[in-house]
Image (cartoon, rainbow, N blue to C red):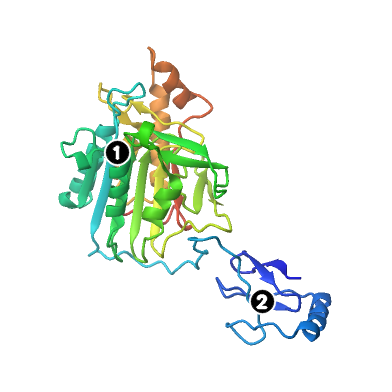
Amino acid sequence: MARRERCNGCKLYLMVPPEAQSIRCAVCHTITNTNNAAIARWGHVHDSLIGPRRTSPHGSGTHAFPYVYGPHQRPPQPRPPLSPVSVHGRKRALLCGLNYYGKPYGLKGSINDVKCMRYLLVEKLGFPIDSILMLTEDEKDPYKIPTKQNIRKGLKWLVYGCQPGDSLVFHFSGHGDRQIDYDNDEVDGFDEALCPLDHDTEGKIIDDEINATIVRPLPRGAMLHAIIDCCHSGTILDLPFVCRMNKEGFYIWEDQRKPSFYKGTSGGLAYCFSACDDNQVSADTTAFTKTSTRTGAMTFSFIQAVENEPGLTYGRLLNAMRNAIRDAKAGLRLSGPIATLVNKVFFGSTSQEPQLSSSYTFDIYSKRFVL
C-alpha cells in the first residue's frame, strides 16, 4: 500500500508508492529520499505481480503523488521572488465606516475613522481622490451604504483589473465577530467576520470570503494593505502568517496554514494591520482626541504613527500603535455606563493589542512600510 512521507522542501505530505525509494514533490519539486530498503524490496515483488506503475512526468523512475486537495482549492505555491513595487503603479482604496445608527450596539467613531483615513491617503500618501471608494451611512448614494452586498461589491472593485505595481488599501471600521469554523480551515476553530450594516438580516462577511476575494487574486508585483479596526480581527484576512510580538518588541512568525487549504496570493504581497487579536475586543474612544470626538483606537494610532514618522518599518509601526494604546490606557479615566466595557478593553485580560499578519514572512524591523 502507498504510504505518506513529508516533503523535505514544502513539508506537505506526499503519497509514496511502496516501491519508491525517492519521490519528487509536485508542488515545490524537491526530491525526498525515503531510505526504506524493505519497502523497496516489496515494491519489486509488487511490480512482478501487477506490472510496473506509471512513472512521474517529472522524470523517469521517480513517482509523484501530490497531496489531494478539495474542489476549488489551490495547493501552496513556492513563494515568488519579491520585486519592488513600480512607482508608476495605480493606487486604489476601499474605506468602510459603520456607526450602526439607531442600533443598541451603535458606534460613534467609525465614520470619523474613514474620513481621517481618506485624508491620510490623499493628502499624505498620494492616493487620487477618485480612486477611493468610501462606504458609510452618511452617503446619499444607496450603492455607497455599507450593506453586505455593497461591501462585497467594493471588495471585488478593489482588486478588479489589478496589475503589477498596484497598491491597494482596504480599511474597515465597525463591528467584528467570530463564529464556529465549519470547514475546518482555521487553526483555532473559529472564523472571524465583519459586520455589515444589515448583518442582522443578511449575515456577516467571514474571513474565508474576504481572503478569496481580495487576497488570492493578487498578482505578482501588486501589494495589498488592510487596516481593520474591529473586534476579533487578528486573522480577518486569513493570511498564512501572523506576527506574534511581546511587549519588548521581540517577535516570531506563527504559521497559520493547514495542508488542504491555500490562503496565499497569486504572487502579490498582502499585509493586514488588525485592531486586536482574534480573542480580543477593540475600543471606540475619545482617549486620543482629548475632545468629545470619538475614533477607533487602532485607526487613530495607525494614522498618528504614519504621519509622525515617515519611512518607518513595519515593526516600528506595529510598536508605535501598541505603545500609543498603552499610553492612552495609562491616562484613561472613565465613568458612566460605558466604563465597564472600555475598562474591559483597556484594563482587562483581553487588553487590545494591534496585530500584523502577512502572506509571507520577513524581517519587520528592516522592511520599510510603504503604501
Label 2: few (<14), some (14–19) or many (≥20) C-alpha neighbours in 10 Å: many
Tell me if residue 371 can be seen: no
Q: What amino acid does circle 1 point to?
A: Thr
Say above or below: 116 vs 109: below
Residue closer to the observer: 341 or 47:
47
- Left or right? Give the position of 50 relative to 109: right
> Which tag, 1 or 2, sits closer to the chain's start?
2
* Camera-nearest residue between 89 and 155: 155
The reply to whether discs 1 and 2 touch (Cβ–Cβ < 8 Å) is no
The percent position of residue 259, horizontal first and vertical second, equals 58, 58
Residue 93 as seen in the image, left or right of residue 351:
left
Task: Give the SS element for disc 1.
Answer: loop
Q: Which residue is mark 1?
A: 147
Pointer 2 residue: 23
Q: Residue 285, which numbered label?
A: none
Determine whether, in the image, residue 178 is placed left or right of residue 312: right
